[in-house]
Image (cartoon, rainbow, N blue to C red):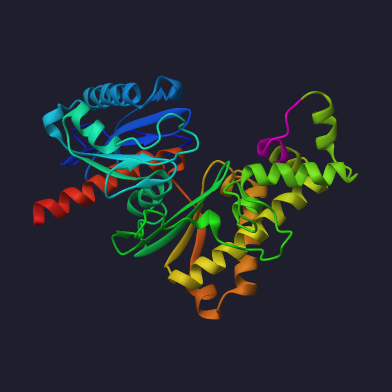
Amino acid sequence: MAHNRQFLSLAQARAPFFVGVDVGGTNIKVGVVDDDGSPLSWLSIATEVERGPDDGVKRMAGAIERAVQDAGLAKKDIARVGLGTPGTMDVAQGILLTPGNLPGWWNFPIKQALADACGLPVTFANDARSAAYGEFWAGSGRVLHSMVLFTLGTGVGGGIIIGDLLVTGEHSAGSELGHLIIDHNDDARMCSCGQRGHIEAYASASAVVKRTEEALEAGRASSLKKRIDSGEELTGLMIDEEAERGDELAMEIILETARYLGIGITSAMHAVDPNGVVIGGAMTFGEHESKIGRAFLERVKQEVRERALPTLADLTTIDFAKLGGDAGFIGAAGLARRDYMQETKG
């Protein structure tokens, strides 16, 4: 989906229809989705955080209107809107609390504000949990009854779905898989949240870059150094590229990242016993299309085989996500659909 986005025509689509909104620190993605989870339209607008939440909500409502028109529909055809946002939140109250990448949007009643602005009922959820639901509903988890998603990006996000239930928790902080502890030592790496030993401190893109920098500073030979010395910024993509070219350090870092992720996945499997585990996000090393991606996935599976209870290791599928960057808005729409179905049945 992320690499070759395809849209259904209105004639092919199945009503009812839903809109998904995926809010990020840089961009906001909006799309119309049918009852089977297939997109009819999609667009992206700049978040422009500095303009404040009221302006952001106003522009979200405008984007929803455009996406609906692009799908060949009218607002009356939309059953509900799903909204996924980053950071801490009170899902029950519909309030953004302290999202780190949305400064100035703190303690903002975003759910009601968007409902008022677009004139449609809104379902509110965390963005990573929305992405997990998207994969469960319309992606890699479509054939699964229960699923755990790990998203690898600047941080590590996650989501847990059991049956049709998205695990949100009593304090809207359920499924925070990036904060699973994989190192209990006093000198464990520091996570962005201020605590030590979390998987995000080892397997996120920012952690991969930091671990690589430390290795280079310790004198490890690598083709990465030549690129950095020429003025390029060290990124996860650069590490992936040099691993593809045979750089030993880059490949070592990637496989070590897979080992850390495998440890966290094993803990999640023991807690949930899902049908499958799905790995998504921006840092998946080319997935099945790349020898590096395939090696990364196999190293994750190897770690799970060595650590998990045999039954779980044998029966739990582990694979890459399918929806890419579309998972967020599709999942937000899917959660809106879930609420709509519950309301209409009730």
**Where's the N terminus, which quadrant?**
top left
Q: Is residue 223 left or right of residue 265?
A: right
Residue 149 at least partly seen: yes
Residue occupying image coordinates x 67% and y 39%: 236
Q: Is residue 243 depicted above or below 310 in this figure?
A: above
Q: Position of residue 168 (x, y in %)?
A: 36, 56
Q: Position of residue 32 (x, y in %)?
A: 27, 34
In this orientation, which residue lies closer to the viewer: 307 or 11?
A: 307
Q: Is residue 112 depicted above or below 264 in this figure?
A: above
Specify the farthest residue to the front.
107
Specify the farthest residue to the bottom.
310
Q: Which residues are magenta?
A: 232-239
Q: Position of residue 16 (x, y in %)?
A: 16, 42
Q: Is residue 160 left or right of residue 317?
A: left
Q: Residue 332 sits in which quadrant?
A: top left
Residue occupying image coordinates x 42% and y 67%: 275
Question: Does residue 340 show up magenta in the picture?
Answer: no
**Where's the C terminus, which quadrant?**
bottom left
Residue 246 at least partly seen: no
Q: Is residue 306 left or right of residue 242?
A: left
Residue occupying image coordinates x 41% and y 58%: 174
Q: Is residue 45 depicted above or below 263 in this figure?
A: above
- Please give the count of numbered marks on the rendered protein: 0
Residue occupying image coordinates x 43% and y 29%: 104
Q: Residue 6 sits in which quadrant?
A: top left
Q: Is residue 157 left or right of residue 236?
A: left
